[in-house]
Amino acid sequence: MAGYGGIGTGIRIVLLMLLVAVLVLGGLIWFDYLGILDAKKTISPVYGLFGIERAEIDAEDPFLLERERLNKQLDALALRAEDLDSREQDIKLKEEELSQMIEQLKEREKSLDDREKVFNERIKAFENRRVNLKQNATYLVGMPPDNAKDILLEMEDQDIIDIFRVTEEQARVEGETSLVSYWLSLMPPERAAALQRKMARKTGG
């Protein structure tokens, strides 16, 4: 008894509590084996005290495999949805880039159309001027040289030079002698010299 009395009261209490816990646990396992008590459900509150969530899986659940399969399918669908969202964002970015490219092409096309329009107008104006020059040259060639000379002197130097060139061109085509030299001889020397210098400069470069 002396040895027994030497053990502290606190230690004896702890040992007794452990013994009781072992007996209770053993009883629960035995009752669970006999089918009298569901030990898993009985012990589950103990997990809750320690903040442990215990997943309960009923092996006899006929829909267990089906639920697992559905969970896997849901996970796969979630991944596919994320992939589709990512692809959709890429498509939107590409659509925006294409829209910008289309706008740039439209602007370039409009610019080219405007340039072509201006070019055609210049060609038309040039052709109209050439037609008028040919007509005027024909009129001048058909009238007396003195009258032609007076009309030419009223014109700007560039207009006179253009008419001279057209007149010489028509004379070559028709195989006749050009009246340009004769017109120049009828003009005042200073004006004739200025016209000849400009014609020579244009011809040379």
Image: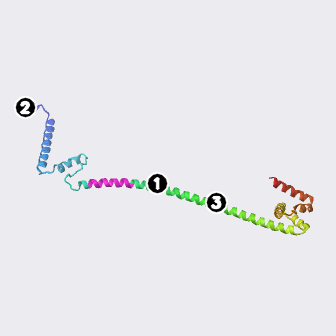
Q: Which of marks 1 and 2 is in front?
A: 1
* Residue under numbered circle 2: 1
Q: Is residue 74 above or below residue 144?
A: above
What element does badge 3 sit on? helix
Residue 188, image x, y percentages: 92, 60
Residue 143, image x, y percentages: 88, 69
Mark 1 vs mark 2, CA separation in Å: 86 Å
Residue 151, image x, y percentages: 87, 67
Badges 2 and 3: C-beta atoms under 8 Å apart?
no
Q: Is residue 170 above or below residue 22?
A: below
Mark 1 vs mark 3, CA separation in Å: 33 Å
Tell me which label, 1 or 2, sits earlier in the chain. 2
Q: In this view, does 28 lie above or below 135?
A: above
Horizontal relation, residue 150 to residue 58: left or right: right
Classify 10 Å Cα crowding around label 2: few (below 14), some (14-19), many (20 and above).
Answer: few
Q: Which residue is drawn at 42% across and 55% down?
A: 85
Q: Which mark is residue 112?
A: 3
User: In front here: 28 or 11?
Assistant: 28
Write the start and end of the magenta stretch as one range.
67-81
Q: Which residue is drawn at 31% across and 55% down?
A: 73
- At label 2, the amino acid type is Met
Residue 92, image x, y percentages: 47, 57
Classify 10 Å Cα crowding around label 1: few (below 14), some (14-19), many (20 and above).
Answer: few
The colour style of the image is rainbow
